[in-house]
Image (cartoon, rainbow, N blue to C red):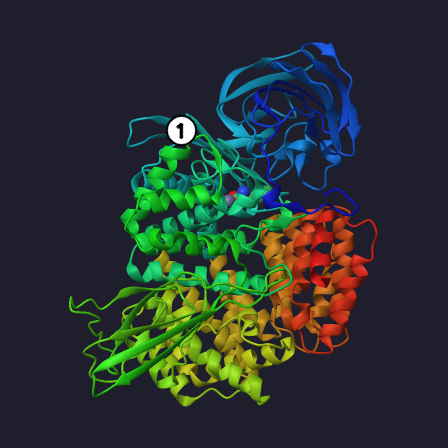
């Protein structure tokens, strides 16, 4: 955020604050051009640390006055800090008055305006852009907030907690007073003021308490809030049932805002959401949107306990709340999905996400542990590692101590730490102490390496069958690659959920109890396990359910993978076997520099899945989708994005052609009569029908057939929901069909007033498979489109992140035009919104593994950005790490 070279903040430098702020009384005189903030704080010295001056954080503020115990006091401003050299020794009343300019706040951190209303975003360090404060998560205070504003323009005035007073003032102004009884860190503070409307629901919980739930949005969006409200209620019910965690507030509010840097924010009792993560109607949102909204509403709600009641001592502990809360929202989504198969679909989607985003992060310039050791800009550490790998770490606790053991550990965690700001060590200790005899507790120190070591461990497995001894010996080894600043790695504790199948697919007993599944705990660099009474060479099914965030090399033959794909009792590993078959083919072609040719065995296996009578459509869709280009790149030491893209396209063409009749059958068998509901069964059918349609249009492009493009266009026009409409549009656009252009035009005309749908329009075009540079040219031209703006993060991401981060073949060009474009855009965004700029900047994280000529050109582009003297610290940290 601040400009210039930023100091590196080190985890081990943590010290308690020299003062505590126990109570805050805030008054806002809201005006878009100049808002006056008056803060009255009750301050006391922290006697546990040496005497020192009182230093408050502040950014982009105009200071009007400073009073201690009602009298003026001498102070100085040192950089961004306000310093009082000689504060009283006894508790004192501290008053500050300052102004801010919300309408000029394009960084969207602190107090800003969006669509004519006021919103705040304080995590991680936005509160200091509202007023001077000890803006760190271990300083927890009780807040009372008075809002004053013009009543006609800002009829709704919201803050955390409970409404205690409201009324009219002179000059058409009015006021509201809110009190939040729970002490909280400043990052959970929020206010909202504007012309909003709310969907309301009163609920009574199991415990017999009544609550008022409200979802606030702009006028006109109310009918798109039903799904969010239902998701909120489902989240409340689930958290009470699964973890015994009830809602602790009378009122729980959720507010939507169009300009927002992230998905959503868990402010106490007043969650603020990116409208993209909140609003849904069948006509405007896809099944994926409905699912994402459910999980984000749940995520923010679950933070009320994991994040708010128990918060982080410092920002290095971010995964304490984020990893745990992602784990909780993933568990919730699985429980909501219901059937074992639908649960597996959730798990597969989560793992795909991890592999597409976190694995590359863990092997690139920004690789960092789940609990980072240093940062210069904390906003850069809201990462896939802290969130998604952090969630996998929490899942491993559950695997090691069992589900009830994990619930007992959570209970102990809250008994010990409710109301505190704590560390990842405190969490680990609570789970371990509640499960004294578990395989976690006996290896706790080693297990905690998951918090300190970056990099994705490589696990190798090799099995040998001894026919005479009737034994099967599994040799396991592990190694974690070096990452920036960490060369020597120690073995991790890797829970490997596994089973053995005979070659007909029958599960074999693993021990005298007859168990067919067990958890092996790999905690050495090399380890051997022997299974007795094994008559013939078995097929090992390892890492079931993706029981640890590692790359597994089990060296299985295609024949063995086919056995797993057909017969494994674990649906995740059935899916994984199919992916591995495809991956092996693709990697073989890439390494040999040969055109890709799918084997008959693979095609027949895929046909078998597609036509299977018992498999769910949702599972079929995942199984028939080829591994992503980013994940394929992860398997290679030198990455040629064009070669990878060509291989994937060839595989897709072959699957499209070879299974043509089966795709037709699948398309026809998965039509849904009747109204739209986003349940797992219907959304699975729609997903498979959309995949089939895209395959049929792709094949038609190759053969010159016009029937399927025509059908796709018709379906696009007639669709009664966004999933089908966008699916048909994507089929045309991704195949490069002639009808794509008129369909895109029609789509834009239909939805020109719905920003979230227009985002999809930009994104679809920027993500289309590259052919002869046309996609890149189109994306570049779209930056000049009347609807394009860098000021709205959703819009900027829909075009720029889509192109630079999710379309490698369009972005990585031999003429380096993609990199030149990237550099221009990063610099342009940086002047407006550094957090957003630094997200886009990360497209170059892995320049060092690129093949030439990409590598040299990419490095030059990064160096050009780094050479700019006035970069934000956000972007500076990213480009400097990239060049390090
Ligand atoms: N804490 C938010 C979440 O994960 C994410 C967020 C971080 C939002 C920083 C805004 C700013 O739910
Ligand atoms: Zn979160």
| Residue 371 vertical placement versus 42 (above, below) | below
62 lies left or right of 686: right
Local secondary structure at mark 1: loop
Residue in front for this viewpoint, 614 or 151: 614
Residue at the (40%, 66%) spot, across then down:
524
**Quadrant where the N terminus is found in the figure:** top right
**Total numbered circles:** 1
The picture quadrant for ligand 1 comes to top right
| Residue 685 vertical placement versus 237 (above, below) | below
**Quadrant where the C terminus is found in the figure:** bottom right
Is the residue marked 1 within 8 Å of ligand 2, measured from its CB?
no
Quarter of image, res 537: bottom left
- In the rendered image, is residue 396 in sight? yes
Residue lying at the far left of the rendered structure: 513
Q: Residues within 10 Å of mark 1 (few under 14, many from 20)?
A: some
Residue in front for this viewpoint, 64 or 71: 71
Image coordinates of residue 695 in percent, x first then y, are 49, 76
Image coordinates of residue 73 in percent, x first then y, are 75, 15
221 lies left or right of 60: left
540 lies left or right of 1: left
Residue in front for this viewpoint, 108 or 377: 377
Please name the residue that numbered disc 1 is placed on.
248
Residue in front for this viewpoint, 75 or 759: 75
Residue at the (26%, 77%) spot, across then down:
501
500 lies left or right of 215: left
Residue lying at the far front of the rendered structure: 50
Image coordinates of residue 426 in percent, x first then y, are 44, 41
| Residue 830 vertical placement versus 221 (above, below) | below
Image coordinates of residue 517 in percent, x first then y, are 25, 66
- In the rendered image, is residue 667 in sight? no
Residue at the (62%, 81%) spot, across then down:
643
């Amino acid at each position: 955020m601040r400009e210039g070279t930023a100091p590196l903040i080190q985890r081990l430098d943590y010290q308690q604050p020299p003062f505590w702020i126990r109570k805050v009384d805030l008054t806002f005189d809201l005006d878009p051009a100049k808002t006056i903030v008056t803060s009255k704080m009750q301050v006391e010295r922290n006697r546990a640390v040496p005497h020192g001056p009182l230093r408050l954080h502040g950014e982009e503020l105009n200071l009007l006055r400073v009073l201690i115990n009602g009298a003026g006091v001498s102070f100085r401003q040192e950089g961004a800090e306000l310093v009082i050299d000689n504060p009283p020794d006894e508790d004192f009343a501290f008053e500050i008055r300052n102004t801010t300019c919300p309408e000029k706040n394009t960084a969207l951190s602190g107090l800003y305006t969006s669509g004519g209303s006021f919103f705040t975003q304080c995590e991680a360090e936005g509160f200091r852009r509202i007023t001077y404060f000890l803006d760190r998560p271990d300083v927890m205070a009780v807040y009372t907030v008075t809002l004053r504003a013009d009543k006609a323009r800002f009829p709704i005035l919201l803050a955390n907690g409970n409404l205690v007073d409201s009324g009219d003032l002179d000059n058409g102004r009015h006021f509201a007073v809110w009190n939040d009884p729970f002490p909280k860190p400043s990052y959970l503070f929020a206010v909202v003021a504007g012309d909003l409307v709310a969907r309301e629901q009163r609920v009574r919980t199991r415990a017999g308490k009544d609550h008022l739930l409200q979802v606030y949005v702009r006028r006109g969006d109310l009918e798109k809030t039903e799904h969010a409200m239902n998701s909120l209620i489902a989240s409340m019910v689930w958290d009470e049932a699964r973890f015994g965690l009830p809602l602790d507030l009378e009122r729980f509010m959720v507010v939507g805002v169009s300009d927002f840097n992230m998905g959503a924010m868990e402010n106490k009792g007043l969650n603020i959401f990116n409208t993209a993560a909140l609003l849904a109607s069948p006509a405007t949102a896809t099944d994926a949107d409905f699912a994402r909204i459910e999980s984000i509403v749940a995520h923010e709600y679950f933070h009320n306990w994991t994040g708010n009641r128990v918060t982080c001592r410092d920002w290095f502990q971010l995964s304490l709340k984020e990893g745990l809360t992602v784990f909780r929202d993933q568990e919730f989504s699985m429980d909501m999905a219901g059937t074992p198969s639908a649960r597996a679909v959730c798990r597969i989607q989560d793992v795909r996400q991890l592999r597409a985003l976190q694995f590359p992060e863990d092997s690139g310039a920004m690789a960092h542990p789940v609990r980072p050791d240093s940062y210069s800009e904390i906003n850069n550490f809201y990462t896939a590692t802290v969130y998604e790998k952090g969630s996998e770490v929490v899942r491993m606790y559950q695997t090691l101590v069992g589900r009830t053991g994990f619930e007992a550990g959570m209970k102990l965690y809250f008994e010990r730490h409710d109301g505190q700001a704590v560390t990842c060590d405190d969490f680990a200790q609570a789970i371990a102490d509640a499960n004294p005899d578990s395989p976690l507790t006996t290896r706790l120190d080693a297990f905690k390496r998951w918090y300190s070591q970056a990099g994705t461990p490589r696990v190798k497995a090799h099995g040998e069958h001894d026919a005479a001894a009737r034994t099967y010996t599994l040799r396991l080894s592990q190694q974690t690659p070096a990452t920036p600043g960490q060369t020597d790695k120690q073995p991790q504790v890797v829970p490997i959920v596994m089973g053995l199948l005979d070659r007909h697919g029958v599960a074999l007993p693993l021990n005298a109890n007859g168990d067919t599944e067990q958890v092996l705990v790999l905690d050495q660099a090399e380890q051997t396990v022997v299974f007795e009474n094994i008559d013939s060479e078995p097929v090992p099914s390892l890492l079931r359910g993706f029981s640890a965030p590692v790359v597994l090399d089990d060296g299985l033959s295609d024949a063995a993978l086919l056995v797993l794909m057909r017969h494994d009792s674990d649906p995740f590993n059935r899916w994984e076997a199919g992916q591995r078959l495809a991956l092996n083919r693709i990697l073989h072609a890439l390494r040999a520099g040969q055109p890709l040719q799918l084997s008959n065995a693979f095609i027949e296996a895929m046909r078998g899945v597609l036509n299977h009578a018992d498999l769910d459509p949702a599972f079929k869709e995942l199984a028939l989708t080829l591994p992503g280009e980013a994940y394929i790149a992860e398997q290679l030491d030198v990455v040629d994005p064009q070669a990878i893209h060509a291989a994937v396209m060839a595989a897709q063409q072959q699957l499209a052609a070879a299974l043509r009749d089966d795709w037709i059958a699948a398309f026809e068998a998965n039509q849904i009569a009747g109204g739209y509901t986003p349940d797992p069964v219907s959304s699975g059918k729609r997903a498979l029908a959309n995949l089939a349609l895209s395959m049929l249009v792709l094949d038609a492009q190759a053969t010159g057939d016009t029937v399927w493009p025509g059908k796709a266009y018709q379906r696009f026009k007639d669709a009664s929901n966004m999933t089908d409409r966008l699916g048909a549009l994507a089929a045309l656009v991704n195949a490069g069909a002639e009808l794509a252009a008129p369909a895109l035009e029609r789509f834009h005309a239909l939805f020109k007033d719905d920003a979230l749908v227009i985002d999809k329009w930009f994104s679809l075009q920027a993500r289309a498979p590259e052919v002869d540079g046309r996609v890149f040219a189109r994306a570049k031209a779209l930056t000049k489109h009347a609807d394009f703006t860098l000021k709205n993060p959703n819009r900027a991401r829909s075009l720029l992140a889509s192109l630079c981060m999710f379309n490698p073949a369009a972005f990585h060009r031999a003429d380096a035009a993609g990199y030149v474009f990237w550099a221009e855009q990063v610099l342009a965004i940086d002047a407006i919104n550094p957090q957003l700029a630094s997200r886009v900047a990360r497209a170059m994280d892995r320049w060092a593994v690129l093949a030439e000529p990409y590598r040299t050109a990419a490095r030059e582009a990064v160096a050009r950005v780094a050479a700019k003297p006035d970069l934000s610290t956000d972007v500076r940290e990213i480009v400097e790490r990239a060049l390090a």
